[in-house]
Image: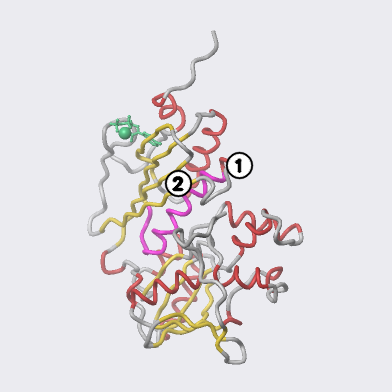
Amino acid sequence: MPDAKPGEFDLIRQHFTRPTRHTLLGVGDDAALLQPSAGQVLAVSTDMLVAGRHFLPDTDPGRLGHKAMAVNLSDLAAMGARPRWATLAIALPEPDPAWLAAFADGFHAEAQQYGVDWVGGDTTAGPLNLSVTILGEVAAAAALRRSGARPGDQLWVSGTLGEAACGLACLQGQLDLPAPARTHCIARLEQPTPRVALGLQLAGLASAAIDISDGLLADLGHLAQASGVAAVVQHAALPTLAALAERRATPLVDDALLAGGDDYELCFTAPAAAAQAILAAGIAAAVTVTCIGTIRAGSGVTVVAADGTVRPARRRGFDHFDGATCP
Ligand code: ADP
Ligand code: MG
């Protein structure tokens, strides 16, 4: 007799039940029981990844598991919160044991790296769809909101920009990069590094923060709007991988820097007097931080060229309901 297909509960037991480190009750009951630390509030965020929209359906399952966790960690980083717990709701067309094992291992490894216990979820048949809810802790007064930027603040970003979008362009045959840069950019797309340590350093120090998931201009636009301020970006200051800097005259690469999605860097603001502390925060978190502009009174995001002229923006970033398709 052929082996019976694994059922929902076999899948949960085999792949989704992992040891926890700081959880009263994890997978297996009707709800998990979590004990927040004294004096902290919970930061809660959910991100959904849909096959064909957020990732290519043939994406390596281990990398996809990593990414599903990493994009959620990035949201907590942008709040200055310490990630603690996560749940995974997954719809699967066909339970392929090898795919599931690789996916669950990638998800769990990335969770463990940041001290996150995987405490529950839901499993169902359907078109491939992943929804992760992450919970973290932060002191209420130190949480990094989008709304705290003030005129006179400096504008900063972590890491380098545009690499994930260039990785996608490589995969789609629209961009040709030398092999090491190509590999690097595809890894940035498929295995983003959430800036959790930097977020923790910036808590109580930065005035506002957002993570760059939809492109610098779009996400900075959200921060500026929430704060009721204008943002001025110095185009020449944008931190750029050398192989991309050489191709900056290419519209595709320039668009990737300003508007490419999936970077998961932090964009944040702080009073000018905090600049030394921001640089020290970057060193402590082992990530470069670059001042890319300033906050002024007004509204909107302006990009200024090296000669001081305002650059017209070609693309603003990704909006799921603007008719564009991605990837
Ligand atoms: P219920 O029917 O009470 O909602 P389920 O049968 O959906 O419970 O789930 C049983 C247990 O397995 C629960 O503790 C739930 O959190 C856990 N679980 C289900 N799917 C997942 C998943 N994808 N990842 C982690 N835990 C899961
Ligand atoms: Mg359920």
Q: Looking at the picture, how far across and down is residue 65, in whole percent?
A: 51, 43
Disc 2 Cβ-to-ligand 1 distance below 8 Å = no
Q: Looking at the picture, how far across and down is residue 232, in whole percent?
A: 48, 84
Q: Is residue 196 left or right of residue 166?
A: left
* Amino acid marked by disc 1: Asp
Q: Which of labels 1 and 2 is toward the front? A: 1
Which mark is first along the chain, 2 or 1?
A: 1
Task: Classify 74 as above or below 148.
Answer: above
Q: Residue at x 26, y 65 (%)?
A: 140
Residue 265 is a magenta residue: no
Q: Is residue 12 left or right of residue 161?
A: left
Nearer to me, 227 or 268? 227
Q: Looking at the picture, how far across and down is residue 54, in whole percent?
A: 51, 51
> Which residue was labeled with disc 2?
111
Q: Quadrant of ligand 1?
A: top left
Q: Residue at x 44, y 77 (%)?
A: 277
Residue 78 is a magenta residue: yes
Q: In the rendering, which numbered label is found on residue 58? A: 1
The residue stretch that appears in magenta: 63-83
* Amino acid marked by disc 2: Ala
Task: Classify 72 as above or below 224.
Answer: above
Disc 1 Cβ-to-ligand 1 distance below 8 Å = no
